[in-house]
Image (cartoon, rainbow, N blue to C red):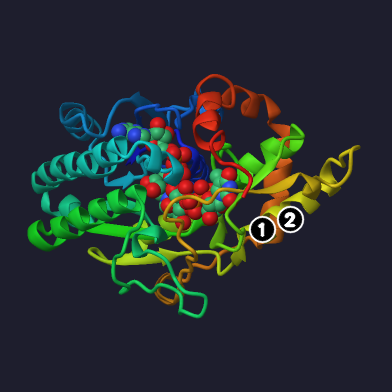
């Protein structure tokens, strides 16, 4: 069985749902249920004996130790993290605590558990750490995409905390021989993503007739990947990746933010036409994110060559699926955008005068 951390969040929940559906392998899901975690994402598994949910912190070493001893997983898949760059700018402390200290605690307990396994299980065990393209910093317009040997140059408290966790994972392999795998993925989108991130925020605002706040000049480039493609790639790396290695995952789909928002508006015009006029009329430019990375792009040659993985979804088809999902799950959106979400919108957007 697998121990998954952060499996009630956006990518973690998609991973748990997909992994159980495809392989049937049981999952123990350890999640603190921060503002970003939501058991509604896992409703389809409510009475499924293959899924055991445990509310708790990856930094709670006694809890992690007892879960490892009781369930004896063949692998740990570590998603749990503070994940939003803008929140890391307003409050970096939680990012250091969960992403760096939390990962350290998990590694320590994994090492103790792994050391005590019988030889065959010890050899088969994996610790898969889910990281990001952001640890490499920002690319210029003409630079080649990041490869697995790119130097680290994190620019935000979020990416610095993820870089810190990556270094610990690397060191646990190098020093102790812990069989680790690290994946670096680009921007995900799809079902269950909180409307604090670009696409769901824009969908939510557009449907409410609110302004669509594009940071800076809207020319920052991200490489977009449909979330279920990311989850499938993680399963491939877990199954056949080389212990100690890292693997890049991306959509080969670089786009400027303004273009992404315009495509989204066109998809919404088609799916839910707006009486007052095209959604693109709601687009407005607001003050930029401090330290905003200009461009990310992932070279995914290695995972294609060694593991045969390629993204299955195009941006066009993935965007259409995503828009449909949000239109069909307005109750979910309503629930996650009431309460504390409003305080976040006030914190992040009220001071962003129109640029
Ligand atoms: P998310 O914010 O949607 O979910 C994070 C989950 O982790 C939540 O369920 C939360 O409750 C849980 N969590 C947070 N702190 C915890 C703690 N201390 N102990 C246990 N659980 C805790 O994040 P996401 O977008 O699903 O990202 C998941 C992982 O993938 C992160 O490690 C992130 O860095 C990485 N990643 C994300 C993207 C992306 O585009 N979203 C891209 C590449 C990599
Ligand atoms: O690249 C992978 C990373 O992608 C992950 O590691 C992070 O966890 C994930 O949050 C995401 O980070 P980004 O900062 O790229 O995603 P976000 O959706 O916050 O922003 C995408 C782009 O859109 C970025 O250039 C900022 C811009 N943006 C974002 C918001 C929320 C806007 O222009 N307006 C907005 O309101």
Above-or-below relation of 273 to 223: above
Q: Residues within 10 Å of mark 2 (few under 14, many from 20)?
A: some
Q: Position of residue 97 (x, y in %)?
A: 24, 37
Looking at the image, can residue 7 be seen? no
Q: Nearer the viewer, residue 221 or 181?
A: 221
Is 114 left, or right, of 233 in this rendering?
left
Q: Which quadrant holds the N terminus?
A: top left
Residue at the (8%, 60%) spot, across then down: 175
Q: Position of residue 263 (x, y in %)?
A: 73, 56
What is the number of callouts on the image?
A: 2
Q: Position of residue 243 (x, y in %)?
A: 24, 63
Above-or-below relation of 176 to 345: below
Q: Quadrant of ligand 1?
A: top left
Q: Nearer the viewer, residue 249 or 151?
A: 151
Q: Is mark 2 within 8 Å of ligand 2?
A: no
Is 230 left, or right, of 2 in this rendering?
right
Q: CA distance from mark 1 to mark 2?
A: 6 Å
Q: Is mark 1 within 8 Å of ligand 2?
A: no
Is 186 left, or right, of 328 in this rendering?
left
Q: Nearer the viewer, residue 187 or 279?
A: 279
Query: Mark 1: which secondary structure?
Result: helix
In the picture of the structure, the residue carrying the numbered disc 2 is 262
Residue at the (69%, 53%) spot, across then down: 261
Query: Mark 2: which secondary structure?
Result: helix
In the picture of the structure, the residue carrying the numbered disc 1 is 258
Q: Position of residue 220 (x, y in %)?
A: 55, 62
* Dot 1 and dot 2 residues touching (CB under 8 Å): yes
């Amino acid at each position: 069985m697998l121990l998954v951390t952060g499996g009630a969040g956006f990518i973690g929940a998609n991973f748990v749902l997909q992994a159980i559906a495809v392989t049937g392998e049981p999952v123990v899901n350890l999640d603190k249920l921060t503002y970003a975690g939501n058991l509604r994402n896992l409703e389809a598994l409510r009475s499924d004996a293959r899924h055991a949910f445990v509310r708790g912190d990856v930094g709670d070493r006694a809890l992690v130790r007892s879960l490892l001893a009781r369930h004896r997983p063949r692998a740990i898949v570590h998603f749990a993290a503070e994940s939003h760059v803008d929140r890391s700018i307003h409050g970096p402390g939680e990012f250091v605590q969960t992403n760096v200290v939390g990962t350290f605690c998990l590694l320590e307990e994994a090492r103790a558990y792994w050391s005590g396994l019988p030889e065959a299980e010890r050899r088969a065990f994996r610790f898969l750490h889910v990281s990001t393209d952001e640890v490499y910093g920002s690319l210029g317009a003409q630079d080649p995409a990041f490869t697995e040997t790119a130097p680290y140059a994190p620019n935000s408290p979020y990416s610095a905390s993820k870089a810190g966790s990556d270094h610990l994972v690397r060191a646990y392999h190098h020093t102790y021989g812990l069989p680790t795998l690290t994946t670096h993925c680009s921007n995900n989108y799809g079902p269950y993503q909180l409307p604090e991130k670009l696409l769901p925020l824009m969908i939510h605002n557009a449907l409410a007739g609110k302004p669509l706040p594009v940071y800076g000049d809207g020319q920052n480039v991200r490489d977009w990947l449909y979330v279920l493609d990311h989850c499938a790639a993680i399963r491939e790396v877990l199954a056949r990746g080389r212990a100690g290695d890292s693997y890049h995952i991306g959509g080969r789909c670089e786009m400027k933010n303004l273009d992404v928002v315009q495509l989204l508006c066109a998809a919404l015009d088609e799916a839910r036409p707006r009486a007052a006029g095209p959604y693109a009329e709601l687009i407005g430019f607001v003050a930029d994110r401090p330290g905003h990375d200009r461009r990310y792009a992932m070279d995914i040659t290695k995972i294609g060559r060694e593991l045969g993985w390629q993204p299955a979804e195009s941006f066009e088809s993935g965007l259409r699926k995503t828009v449909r999902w949000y239109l069909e799950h307005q109750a979910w959106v309503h629930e996650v955008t009431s309460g504390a979400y409003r305080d976040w919108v006030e914190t992040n957007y009220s001071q962003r005068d129109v640029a």
